[in-house]
Amino acid sequence: MTDNKLDTPPDHLSNDPRSKFHDPSVLERGIGIRFNGVERHNVDEYCISEGWVRLPVGKSLDRRGQPMTMKVKGKVEAWFLDDASEVETPAD
């Protein structure tokens, strides 16, 4: 019996370590994102329930040196790139 929580990516996830939605353990597994039917590889943040992704805008940076992003609304689908059984659990 598989645990559904391990097979389902979080509803909201961010690449930015300063965000409260940043989760390094989930990001290590790899997340695939399909936005409006097109697989995207440059998503900085997403929210499935609200239906948006945050994408970088060219190479421009804000005044703090972070990439400028824009929020785009549409249908968001997320999945893990690896299998839950491949994730190693630390030995006790």
Image: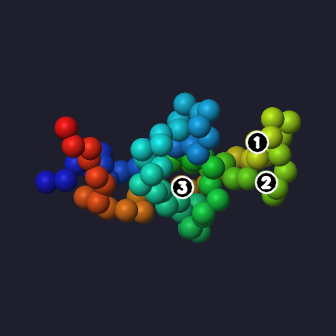
Residue 77 visible within the image? yes
Where residue 78 appears, as percent x and y from the top left, is 47, 56
Q: Which of 34 and 30 is in front in this view?
A: 30
**Of marks 3 and 2, which one's residue comes earlier in the chain?**
2
Give the answer, above or below, for where 33 lies relative to 48.
below
The secondary element bearing badge 2 is classed as: strand
Q: Nearer the viewer, mark 2 or mark 1?
A: 1
Q: Mark 1 points at which residue?
A: 66
Query: Could you say whether the residue bearing mark 1 is in a helix, strand or loop?
Result: loop
The residue wearing badge 2 is 57
Taking the spot 47% from the left edge, 56% from the top edge, the residue there is 31
Name which residue lies at 25% across and 58% down: 85
Q: Residue at x 29, y 60 (%)?
A: 86
Three-letter residue code for mark 3: Val
Q: In this view, does 12 lie to the left or right of 1?
A: right
Check disc 2 and give the amino acid type.
Answer: Val
